[in-house]
């Protein structure tokens, strides 16, 4: 029997979560129960001061075969543990990449989406996000976060692209590693997902992906590799799809030995909800913890039977049990009561700061922004996303708010609310134009809604808030050939272009602010607007960030983690035809086939190689101040390359210095024009300078050789380019 929904359910039935006021005091959500078997009370495995591996071996020897088998699956839909004899109390696995989703009417801090986090290019800030989420998990008896998600934006239409960290494996891996290190330093496990090729929602549970080995190694597995090597996630979640005819979750030879052998990863693989296709195939294939699954003595006996009959390889069975014990010990399930804070004021401030730093200023003709509130009489806020809730704060369910990444914060400040708070209600004219859905809640229920261009005519300045919403950008639930999970096209949702045309005819002083999770097409109107902001899904304080940026209280510093093309076929995944995306269901309705014929040419790698001019390049983002970059010396033998960054403007601001490497190529092995190899975000006051040094190693020189079936280094001269986007790299060095 298949389960109808996967990864979407909140922990609705657990009795752990209770509502807490903002700024709640420290709360204990769980206690450690002693083993019911008194002979276990003082056993070495319960002593957290003993070496971890000795504790693992000690407990393993004390378990019955059925108890070992019980550790290969959960004890409810979202819980693990509950083995009283050994003192393993149950704990929750939470969908919590953007904020802990709780049952009932409970509230937790909710952060901007993954694309927004990546747009900050700020690893220190992402560490703070991890610390907050870990604390809020512990306040709700959660010991594992089902994230972060580091699948890549192969296509801008992908339904869950908003959860991911953009199109580049290096950036995604570094952001993920920062998050993971912070979460796990606080005793909560992450579950890096989805391993591997969960890059679209269309038929994600049955699609059979055939990708070249070079693409697998250099692109799709690379963010996982960076995260594993730099942060060692305690669990990794498998994907639903197949790879070359076999379930990804069961691919020890093709996929999972990359984790276990090549990277010597010592964590455990958790199945995505329903992606466990038989005990023997899963365990033999390298997937070691089935979710969802309740306590089941008959299942445990059957697993033992399969082991004794040789249908489950005993060495894999024992490896699975030990990895799951290690995971439970790492999260303190035997020794550490959970204590944390839920929805504290300082947590909310971190969410606000992410929203601020995520805003990307894409266009600003004649320094139209920032606006001076003292010089503006009336300001019109127009568009379907002006007062649209993107979280579940209005009572919407997870399906309407993105799926597994949906959250229920104590409040959501919409763009309209942020502008009203700053300008005052009497100066704001609100006209949605049209709505994506009937509102369950409004920011200002008694506020007059102006009428198709009257507000624009009456106002000194217009802020048009458009884009998409979470009935477009969402996880697709169900099983089989599903066609509703990805976006249908690159356009703004609904008739926004016609609405925007009418607004611009009435008032050309119009700022457009996009709320979305991935690139959208802007070609029809981009030349008519003086300023364009990318807000992404900005979390519970999106409106605050918008208001602060448009008025200059915050100097925008976000950089694109993905390329904005001018048309859909600018992406190679789409120009290659339907077999590349979304796949071909004609061969078999239950087993649609997809070939990654775009190979390594994902995102800017393709735009650069094919000579396609993007609308906005990867790494791009403007500021209200200006910066210069000048060469500052090199030490090629040590792999050190430096630039001097100077704030040459009249405002304090942050710039992200980006380092790219160009590898020599041969006729047999084409190389990208450039690949991201380092970045650093620097905040400077007017006139202030800082020298930024990148230290590169031979790891950055490597490529995957299909001929040798291993990593290799191309002989020749390498080029190191440094600048503030993939298309603006004024400082260049040679490297041999």
Image (cartoon, grey):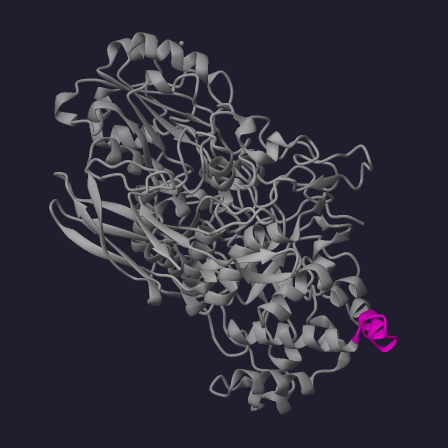
Give the residue displayed 51% in from the left and 86% down from the top: 51
Q: Quadrant of the C terminus?
A: bottom left
**Residue 235 x/y as whole percent:** 57, 64
Within the image, what quadrant is residue 489 found in?
A: top right
**Residue 524 x/y as whole percent:** 43, 16
For this orientation, the residue located farthest to the right is 309
Residue 74 visible at all: no
Q: Is residue 311 above or below residue 201?
A: below
Labels in figure, total:
0
What stretch of residues is rendered in magenta? 301-313
Within the image, what quadrant is residue 696 found in?
A: bottom left
Tell me the chief SS of the magenta region.
Answer: helix
Tell me: 156 left or right of 458: right
Q: Is residue 302 magenta?
A: yes
Tell me: 516 left or right of 727: right
Residue 172 or 506: which is nearer the viewer?
Answer: 172
Q: Is residue 414 above or below residue 148?
A: above
Tell me: 259 left or right of 626: right
Q: Is residue 271 above or below residue 589?
A: below
Give the residue displayed 20% in from the left and 29% down from the top: 370
Q: Is residue 471 magenta?
A: no
């Amino acid at each position: 029997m298949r389960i109808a929904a996967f990864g979407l359910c909140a922990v609705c039935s657990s009795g752990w979560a209770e509502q807490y006021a903002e700024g709640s005091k420290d709360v204990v959500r769980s206690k450690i129960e002693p083993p019911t078997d008194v002979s276990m009370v003082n056993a070495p495995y319960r002593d957290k001061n003993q070496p971890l591996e000795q504790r693992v071996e000690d407990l393993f020897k004390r378990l019955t075969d059925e108890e070992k088998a019980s550790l290969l699956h959960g004890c409810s839909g979202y819980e693990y543990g509950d083995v009283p004899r050994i003192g393993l109390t149950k704990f929750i696995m939470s969908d919590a990449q953007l904020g802990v989703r709780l049952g009932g009417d409970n509230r937790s801090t909710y952060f901007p989406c993954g694309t927004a986090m990546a747009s900050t290019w700020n690893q220190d800030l992402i560490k703070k996000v991890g610390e907050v989420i870990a604390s809020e998990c512990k306040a709700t008896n959660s010991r594992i976060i089902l994230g972060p998600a580091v699948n890549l934006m192969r296509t801008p239409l992908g339904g869950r692209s908003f959860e991911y960290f953009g199109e580049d494996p290096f950036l995604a891996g570094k952001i993920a590693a920062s998050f993971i290190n912070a979460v796990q330093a606080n005793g909560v496990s992450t579950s890096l997902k989805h391993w591997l090729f969960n890059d679209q929602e269309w038929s994600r549970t049955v699609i059979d992906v055939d990708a070249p080995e070079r693409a697998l190694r250099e692109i799709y597995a690379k963010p996982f590799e960076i995260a594993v090597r730099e942060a060692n996630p305690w669990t990794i979640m498998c994907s639903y799809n197949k790879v070359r005819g076999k379930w990804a979750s069961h691919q020890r030879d093709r996929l999972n030995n990359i984790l276990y052998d090549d990277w010597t990863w010592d964590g455990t693989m958790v199945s995505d909800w329903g992606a466990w296709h038989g005990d023997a195939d899963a365990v033999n294939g390298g997937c070691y913890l089935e979710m969802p699954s309740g306590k089941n003595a008959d299942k445990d006996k059957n697993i033992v039977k399969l082991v004794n009959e040789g249908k489950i390889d005993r060495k894999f069975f024992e490896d699975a049990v030990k990895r799951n014990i290690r995971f439970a010990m790492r999260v303190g399930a035997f020794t550490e009561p959970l204590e944390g804070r839920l929805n504290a004021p300082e947590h909310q401030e971190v969410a606000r700061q992410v929203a601020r730093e995520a805003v990307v200023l894409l266009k600003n003709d004649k320094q139209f922004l920032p606006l001076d509130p003292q010089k503006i009489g009336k300001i019109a806020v127009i568009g379907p996303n002006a007062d649209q809730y993107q979280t579940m704060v209005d009572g919407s369910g997870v399906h309407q708010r993105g799926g597994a990444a949906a959250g229920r914060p104590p409040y959501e400040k919409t763009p309209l609310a942020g502008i009203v708070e700053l300008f005052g209600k009497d100066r704001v004219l609100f006209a949605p134009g049209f709505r994506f859905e009937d509102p369950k809640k409004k920011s200002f229920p008694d506020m007059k809604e102006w009428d198709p261009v009257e507000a624009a005519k009456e106002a000194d300045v217009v802020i048009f808030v458009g884009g998409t919403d979470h009935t477009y950008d969402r996880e697709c639930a169900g099983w089989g050939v599903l066609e509703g999970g990805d976006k249908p096209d690159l356009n703004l949702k609904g008739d926004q272009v016609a609405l925007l045309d009418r607004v611009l005819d009435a008032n050309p002083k119009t700022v457009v602010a996009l709320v979305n999770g991935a690139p959208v097409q802007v070609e029809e109107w981009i030349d008519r607007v003086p300023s364009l902001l990318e807000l992404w899904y900005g979390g519970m304080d999106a409106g605050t960030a918008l208001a602060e940026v448009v008025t200059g209280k915050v100097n925008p510093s976000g950089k694109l983690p993905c390329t904005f093309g001018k048309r859909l076929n600018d992406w190679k995944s789409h120009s290659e035809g339907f077999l590349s995306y979304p796949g071909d269901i004609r061969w078999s309705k239950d087993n649609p086939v997809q070939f990654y014929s775009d190979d390594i040419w994902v995102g800017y790698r393709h735009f650069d190689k094919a000579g396609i001019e993007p609308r906005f390049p990867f790494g791009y983002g403007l500021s209200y101040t200006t910066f210069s970059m000048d060469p500052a010396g090199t030490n090629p033998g040590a792999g050190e390359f430096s630039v001097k960054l100077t704030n040459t403007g009249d405002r304090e601001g942050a710039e992200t210095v980006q380092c790219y490497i160009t590898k020599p190529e041969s006729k047999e092995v084409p190389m990208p024009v450039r690949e991201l190899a380092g970045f650093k975000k620097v905040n400077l006051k007017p006139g202030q300078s800082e020298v930024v040094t990148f230290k590169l190693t031979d790891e950055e020189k490597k490529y995957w050789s299909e001929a040798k079936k291993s990593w290799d280094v191309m002989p020749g001269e390498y080029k190191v380019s440094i600048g503030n986007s993939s298309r603006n790299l004024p400082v260049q060095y040679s490297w041999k």
